[in-house]
Image (cartoon, rainbow, N blue to C red):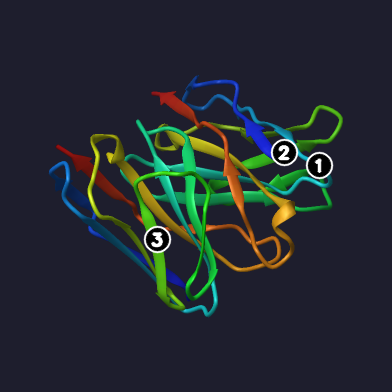
Amino acid sequence: SQTIHQWPATLVQPVGSPLSLECTVEGTSNPNLYWYRQAAGRGLQLLFYSIGIDQISSEVPQNLSASRPQDRQFILSSKKLLLSDSGFYLCAWSTGGFTEAFFGQGTRLTVV
Amino acid sequence: AQSVAQPEDQVNVAEGNPLTVKCTYSVSGNPYLFWYVQYPNRGLQFLLKYITGDNLVKGSYGFEAEFNKSQTSFHLKKPSALVSDSALYFCAVRDMRAGYNFNKFYFGSGTKLNVKP
């Protein structure tokens, strides 16, 4: 069966520090991968999505970047964090067609 | 543009009573709609989806949703609420502009369901 791993679960980082959040998927190949951010426990904002290795699309301009160095690995990064980067970050995957998305457990990022 | 709206920030219901969480959609073409649930500090869990066929879709944990094309709605329902159903519920739509092989999902703002004993 397919599983998705996302880590760390919580992270407290100072302003100006770098960021690296990692997400890996097991049990499937060539998944579509997504990074979402959830602010204040409510709506989800799609940040990045990827249809394949090194194929990244950004939904909104921001201080973050994403990379997909391997088929089932998706990384969210920043060179210098801002206070406004705080939030709950969710990684997800899906296949093509009309399948649903499957989410990781999320990373609570607090920038101080 | 593809979008969904959840008009209620919060829904309160007593345990044992029926519950409804509302969702309306705006899409070009056929809608492909989903419901998810989120417990505190956790990822989203898939409940059910409408792709085609019967307007009443049954999903996990006793939830169901009714697709209404004329009202452009996809309301989530449960005949008898449990305290453990208290959570944040999201409606989502698949963006068909992305093509068949790639799913791009847009989510509503979420509705907090409170089920009181």
Residue at the spot of label 1: B28
* Residue shown at the point (38%, 41%) measured from the top left: B39
Alpha-carbon distance for marks 1 and 2?
Answer: 7 Å
Label number found at residue A66: 3
Neighbour tally class for label 1: few under 14, some 14-19, many 20 plus, Cα within 10 Å = few
Dot 1 or dot 2: first in sequence order is 2
Please state which of the two labelled residues, at mark 1 or mark 3, is closer to the viewer.
Answer: 3
Are tags 1 and 2 found on a single chain?
A: yes
Which quadrant, please, contains the N terminus of chain B? Answer: top right
Which quadrant, please, contains the C terminus of chain B? Answer: top left
The chain under label 3 reads A
Residue at the spot of label 2: B1
Quadrant position of residue A62: top left
Q: Nearer the viewer, residue A34 or B67?
A: A34
Relative image position of residue B30 (x, y in whole percent): 82, 47
* Outermost residue to the right: B70
Asked if marks 1 and 2 touch (Cβ < 8 Å), the reply is yes
Q: Amino acid at mark 3?
A: Ala
